[in-house]
Amino acid sequence: MSGPPVEMIRVLDPGPLTTVQDAGRGGQMRYGIPPSGPVDRRSFVLANRLVGNPDGAAALEFTLIGPRLRAEKPCIIAVTGADAPVTVDDAAAPAWTTLTLAAGDVVKIGAARAGVRGYVAVAGGIDVPPVLGSRATYLRGRMGGVQGRALARDDGLPLGAAATATAPRRRAVPLDARPQWGGEPVLRVVLGPQAERFTEDGIAAFLGSSYQLLPQSDRMGTRLNGARITHARGHDIISDGIALGTVQVPGDGQPIVMLVDRQSTGGYTKIATVCSFDIARIGQAKPGQRLRFTAVDVAAAHRLLEESDAALAGVELQEIA
């Protein structure tokens, strides 16, 4: 029988916001506890695959600026997501690639040049205690991860039993499978469930205008500013369920897109829902960046989701000599 997990990663500098996330905490929304998990699921999954972990193994999600970490023992890592510089002992190292660290090596991830959220996966996964079946950090609920909070200087991160000191095959995500951030992304939405509570002009504004992402955005929701979306019969409803990607429109007519740490219910009218396969696009948009919405029907959304899942499943990691 294997012993307890051994601490292998030391946090020298956590960056502004770095948390432990796994695939998410399912089945708890009825109690007001969101799933949490990664905002950019594709980048998270590919990071885990690069180090030989299951897709949902616990890894780190950083925001805008990455952490500085020291390997206490040899380990294998990968960095994906936002386009940020990576160094190992001050020497440039590639992202989207398997990296082998020796004991004492220091990896540093700098400020994101494009995108907002990045991921650091370590072979074996971050082995913090599960809470309600998940290691995902829910900051507002002080739950999961490292004592329910963001990482802090001098935290020690234990790794699971799969961690190994032996060098694996070096692998990289092909360039054409790496997302490109920036520009003016177009998010696909399904209108409703309260689309009838908006005027025709309001819906036309929502679908025909660009919206700027505001700094007052986080893992709970993204606030946007742009053309006013006008209500036909008021902005309040009897509170009902909030799904991933729900687009709420309060009385000021400015949309709010709900993300992985969202509340379970809400009383603002909902004009649309962003399709799950486009959540990463809004989660990787920087404050000040502009984006647009386009409507698809439910059948098209299902087809596009199947295509997105198939594309992720079909990514073949490249061997590096």
Image (spheres, helix red, strand yellow):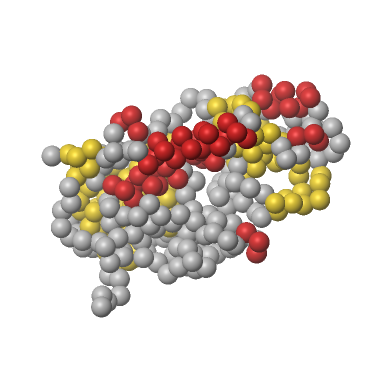
Which is nearer the eye, 214 or 253?
253
Tell me what residue is drawn at x 17 percent, y 47 percent. Answer: 169
Quadrant of the rendered image containing residue 251: top right
Q: Quadrant of the C terminus?
A: top left
**Where is residue 244 shown, x and y percent of the image?**
60, 46
> Seen in the image, is 254 located left or right of residue 67?
right
Tell me what residue is drawn at x 19 percent, y 40 percent. Answer: 319
Q: Quadrant of the N terminus?
A: bottom left
Tell me what residue is drawn at x 69 percent, y 27 percent. Answer: 206
**Count of number-bearing discs:** 0
> Seen in the image, is 314 located left or right of residue 92?
right
State whether residue 186 appears in this view.
yes
**Where is residue 63 shown, x and y percent of the image?**
45, 46
Tell me what residue is drawn at x 17 percent, y 39 percent. Answer: 320
State whether residue 138 appears in this view.
no
Which is nearer the eye, 85 or 265?
265
**Where is residue 314 shown, x and y percent of the image?**
35, 38
**Where is residue 207 shown, x and y percent of the image?**
66, 25
